[in-house]
Amino acid sequence: QVQLVESGGGLVQPGGSLRLSCAASGSIAGIGTMGWYRQAPGKQRELVATITTGDTANYADSVKDRFTISRDNAKNTVYLQMSSLRPEDTAVYYCYGFVLPTRGYFSNYWGQGTQVTVSS
C-alpha cells in the first residue's frame, strides 16, 4: 500500500511564505514525476508544479518566480516552497506521485490535501 501525506499548510499573510512537504511511504519500488495541484473553492483543480526524477521542474504561469518545487529521492519526499503569497493562492494543495509499488504498475497516487489560506 502506498500513501502520500502532505504537511506544512496554514494561514499566512499576503507576501508571506510557506513550505509544503509531501512524503510517500509504503511498499514502493520507485517514484517518477511528483508534483502539486491545488483547488480553490468553486474552481477546478489546477496544476501548480511538477518535478521529474532528473529534477526538471515545470510551473504554472501564475506561480512562476514565486514557488519552487524540489524533491529528496532518498526520502521519497517532494517540497513546495511558496513565497510572495497572494490571496488568490488560497486553496487546498494536493501532492501526487507517479509511483511504482513493489507489486503492481506505475500509477498516480494522491495525498489528502493541505489547506493554504492567504489572508490579512
Image (spheres, helix red, strand yellow):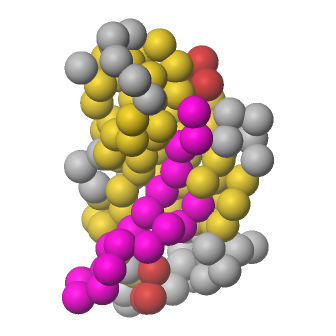
| Residue 54 relative to residue 67: left or right | right
Q: What residue is rendered at 39% in x and 68% in y?
A: 38
For the residue pair 70 and 33, the one nearer the viewer reads as 33
Q: Is residue 33 magenta?
A: yes
Q: Toward which corner of the image does residue 12 lie, by quadrant? A: bottom left
- Image mark count: 0
Q: Is residue 105 magenta?
A: no
| Residue 50 relative to residue 27: left or right | right
Coordinates of residue 55 in the picture (x, y in percent): 74, 41
Q: Toward which corner of the image does residue 13 lie, by quadrant? A: bottom left
Residue 107 visible in image: yes
Coordinates of residue 78 in the picture (x, y in percent): 53, 40
Above or below 87: residue 58 = above
Q: Residue furthest front?
A: 105
Q: What residue is rendered at 68% in x and 33% in y?
A: 53
Residue 10 visible in image: no
| Residue 102 relative to residue 84: left or right | left
Above or below 25: residue 22 = below
Q: What residue is rendered at 23% in x and 88% in y?
A: 42
Above or below 32: residue 96 = below
Coordinates of residue 37 in the picture (x, y in percent): 43, 63
Quadrant of the image for the C terminus? bottom left
Coordinates of residue 57 in the picture (x, y in percent): 72, 53
Above or below 77: residue 70 = below
Q: What residue is rendered at 62% in x and 37% in y?
A: 71
The part of the chain drawn in magenta is 32-49
> Magenta residues: mostly which secondary structure?
strand
Quadrant of the image for the N terminus? top left
